[in-house]
Image: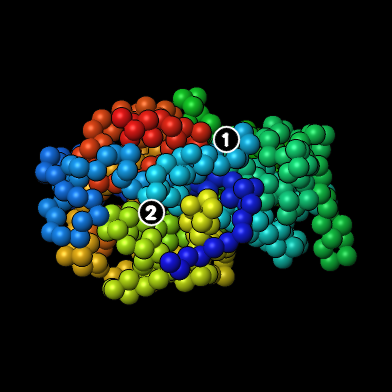
Amino acid sequence: MKRKLVAMTLAAVMGLSVAACGSSGDDKPANDGNKTEDNKDAGATNDENADAPDDAGDAEGDDGAASGDVANKDKPLVWFNRQPSNSSTGELDMSALTFNDKTYYVGFDANQGADLQGTMVKDYIEANIDKIDRNGDGVIGYVLAIGDIGHNDSIARTRGIRKALGTGVEKDGNINSDPIGTNTDGSASAVQDGTLEIGGKTYTVRELASQEMKNSAGATWDAATAGNAIGTWSSSFGEEIDIIASNNDGMGMSMFNAWSKDNNVPTFGYDANSDAVAAIAEGYGGTISQHADVQAYLTLRVLRNALDGVDIDTGIGTADEAGNVLSDDVFVYNEEQRSYYALNVAVTSENYQDFTDSTKIYEPVSKQLDAAKSPSKKVWLNIYNASDNFLSSTYQPLLQNYDDILNLEVEYIGGDGQTESNITNRLGNPGQYDAFAINMVKTDNAASYTALLNQ
């Protein structure tokens, strides 16, 4: 079996998740990204033919009914966007990642993307120094919107910004990712003042403020909270803010629309959501594409291969019969962690027009599978928060494009972003499904799902 193998440390994959994130995730009111034809809206159920038995992985004719003789604990499972891990230490939950021999994780290279975001911000400052220091005090002040202090994607992105700008302070062998509150005088202990030498002049770089964007109901990555935060910060020390950095585009765009667009303050996010990419033409500084098109494909392709009983690399690193294949420059596979990671790309004013449609499927893996060899199968898939901008507006529409190509009948469940039970309570009969794709609210909570599959 031909696989993409990379030597990654646990630290190098913190939170592939996401993101959230994915990315990675971004919270804002639900939109049409949650709605599709054929009753594929978030939370919709589809019980048609649920009782008709069938062998998962059988390549014979299939009416789409779930397997009646395969135990739930033995069915294919993909964790995606939030990698099972300890939210405090980042240590991977290998019991979840090896739940059975058909279990994998799909996310993106969090540290590579975090470093890319930090470098993008630093490069922008250096290229535009003549207009960055708005009040001419020699201090490049930035504020930072943190998505979720316990989410590894968020941690990595915070570290990436502080590393690139020289404001990071070591804690337990890594850059401290704690929010600092307000730090206009440079006295915070979790960060330090950095310096940049540009055009023969030394500039101080200071993190003026940062906070976790968590709303009163407990949902993190909250765009509305970020919009309120920039309102508070700008009214208190707005003339000192030269740059806005955000762990994702949902929060970044909220801050951009609330204040920074009108005040010509460049804002940098993550996820390459369509609205953020379009906003680059209006002064949004840039964003990072975590190749959601590749991630969404991998999420369902891994399940498809496991269901068909073929080499897991089929249609991924090795071309399938239809010609679908991914190249080395868009993903890597870590066999020890049973994890597929998409690679990231910086989106700036120089290339943003190539990323204007975030829901367009990736052309090299867009060819329809033969239904005779890959018959219809039922998949239960959840999105941790139906209001998450990235997942509902970008990731889920991509999944819904790929599910047809891969002959998968997917039931999409949208959570509330706050409690696992809001999702797990809707997996009352896992026997209806042939496979599962799970996006947890918290990375610590994989056992909430595997316990259901073990029953």
Q: Looking at this view, is 6 or 124 the one in front?
A: 6
Q: Could you tell me residue 14's position as x and y percent?
A: 59, 46
Residue name at image x 22 percent, y 59 percent: 407
Q: Could you tell me residue 137's position as x and y percent?
A: 83, 49
Where 29 falls versus 38 (above or below)? above
Instruction: Describe residue 12's horizontal placement relative to residue 66 as left or right.
Output: right
Instruction: Describe residue 123's horizontal placement relative to residue 292 as left or right.
Output: right
Q: Could you tell me residue 215's position as x and y percent?
A: 50, 29
On the question of residue 92 being in view, the answer is yes
Q: Which picture quadrant has residue 322? A: bottom left
Q: Could you tell me residue 31's position as x and y percent?
A: 34, 44
Answer with mark 1 or mark 2, whichever residue precedes in sequence: 1
Q: Quadrant of the C terminus?
A: top left
Would you call the spot at circle 1 few (<14 residues within 10 Å), some (14-19), or many (20 or more)?
many
Please give the residue where the numbered disc 1 appears in the rendered image: 87
Distance from disc 1 to disc 2, alpha carbons, whole Å, reads 22 Å
SS class of the residue under badge 2?
Answer: helix
Q: Amino acid at mark 1?
A: Ser
* Mark 1 touches mark 2? (CB < 8 Å): no
Q: Looking at this view, is 323 or 135 the one in front?
A: 323
Q: Residue furthest top?
A: 216
Q: Which mark is residue 398?
A: none
On the question of residue 240 being in view, the answer is no
Residue name at image x 68 percent, y 46 percent: 159
Where 60 falls versus 36 (above or below)? below
Residue name at image x 64 percent, y 48 percent: 11
Q: Quadrant of the N terminus?
A: bottom left
Q: Amino acid at mark 2?
A: Thr
Please give the residue where the numbered disc 2 appears in the rendered image: 299
